[in-house]
Image (cartoon, rainbow, N blue to C red):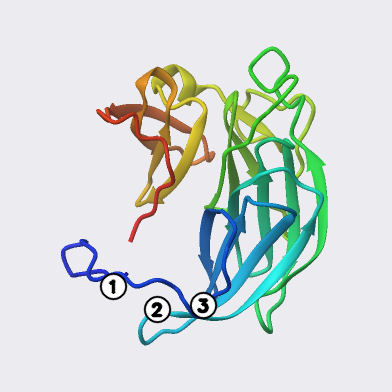
């Protein structure tokens, strides 16, 4: 859809040049490519070239990322892609090709057990992923997980993650107590603020402060009469 100057969307067209996605459950844009996490069937993340003139898609590549169960979150940088699957409870990290944006050399770790006694045992049920300020953010049963991204693109979930900011794996305890958005289904970041969506406590959008440590806190909830809990984007 074209984006109008006031932020509204113009006349939308179907991405008919792209393949038929089974269940496109999460999207990310990076380096001129659209990444589509397909939640239907085996583990595929499509990488499609975005036409700068009209936003249409072409040359979509089906990237097989391994054994997963229901992909529902993807975040991409210039060098790495991070994908989570809700029923498998995994985080999959792949290398991004600088040539065509395709994914390869994928590795997988479980997120189950990262917060024993606080919602991620036995199942972490990750629902979303986002990258901002050198950190990977994952929305889990226990709230948001903050993982600093190393220079080589790797992240390190510990078991259990710490509640202390600045560690290699932090379960941010501030969001569940200051906001109703737990579990978190979507992240967006803009000018030092974080926006989180979820369905706990009736749903809504949390408008939060993003601290220098990367922790999200001081959330004010904008309630949603429809119990909104989907993805978010800032343009």
Residue named by callout 2: 55
C-alpha distance separating marks 1 and 3 = 16 Å
Q: Nearer the viewer, mark 3 or mark 2?
A: 2
- Quarter of the image with the N terminus is bottom left
> Within the image, what quadrant is residue 208 found in?
top left
User: Crowding at label 2, few (<14), some or many (≥20) Cα neighbours within 10 Å?
Assistant: some
Residue named by callout 3: 32
Residue 134 visible in image: yes
Which of marks 1 and 2 precedes in the sequence?
1
> Within the image, what quadrant is residue 145 found in?
top right
Residue named by callout 1: 2
Residue 35 screen position, x and y as percent: 57, 65
Q: Nearer the viewer, residue 205 or 178?
A: 205
Residue 234 screen position, x and y as percent: 35, 56
Residue 152 visible in image: no
User: CB atoms at circles 2 and 1 under 8 Å apart?
Assistant: yes
User: Relative to 197, is 102 on the left or the right?
Assistant: right
C-alpha distance separating marks 2 and 1 = 8 Å
User: Relative to 61, is 17 on the left or the right?
Assistant: left
Residue at 69% in and 70% down: 62
Is 168 drawn above or below residue 41 in the view shown? above
Which of marks 3 and 1 precedes in the sequence?
1
- Quarter of the image with the C terminus is bottom left
Residue at 71% in and 25% down: 123
Residue 15 screen position, x and y as percent: 45, 73
Residue at 40% in and 20% down: 178
Residue 37 screen position, x and y as percent: 60, 56
Q: Nearer the viewer, residue 121 or 69?
A: 69
Secondary element under disc 1, as helix, strand or loop, is: loop
Residue at 34% in and 52% down: 191
């Amino acid at each position: 859809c074209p984006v109008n100057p006031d932020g509204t969307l113009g006349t939308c067209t179907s991405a008919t040049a792209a393949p038929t996605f089974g269940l496109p459950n999460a999207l990310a844009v990076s380096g001129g490519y659209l990444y589509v996490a397909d939640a239907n069937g085996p583990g595929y993340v499509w990488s499609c070239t975005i036409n700068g003139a009209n936003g249409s898609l072409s040359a979509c590549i089906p990237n097989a990322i391994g054994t997963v169960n229901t992909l529902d979150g993807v975040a991409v940088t210039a060098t790495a892609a991070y994908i989570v699957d809700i029923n498998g409870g995994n985080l999959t990290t792949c290398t991004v090709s600088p040539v065509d944006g395709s994914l390869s050399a994928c590795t997988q770790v479980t997120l189950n057990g990262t917060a024993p006694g606080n919602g991620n045992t036995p199942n972490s049920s990750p629902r979303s992923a986002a990258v901002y300020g050198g950190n990977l953010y994952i929305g889990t049963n226990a709230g948001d997980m903050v993982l600093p991204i190393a220079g080589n693109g790797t992240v390190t979930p510990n078991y259990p993650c710490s509640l202390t900011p600045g560690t290699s794996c932090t379960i941010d305890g501030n969001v569940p107590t200051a906001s109703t958005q737990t579990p978190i289904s979507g992240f967006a970041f803009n000018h030092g603020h974080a926006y989180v969506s979820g369905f706990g406590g009736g749903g809504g959008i949390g408008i939060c402060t993003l601290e220098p440590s990367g922790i999200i806190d001081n959330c004010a909830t904008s309630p949603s009469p429809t119990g909104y809990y989907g993805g978010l984007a800032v343009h």
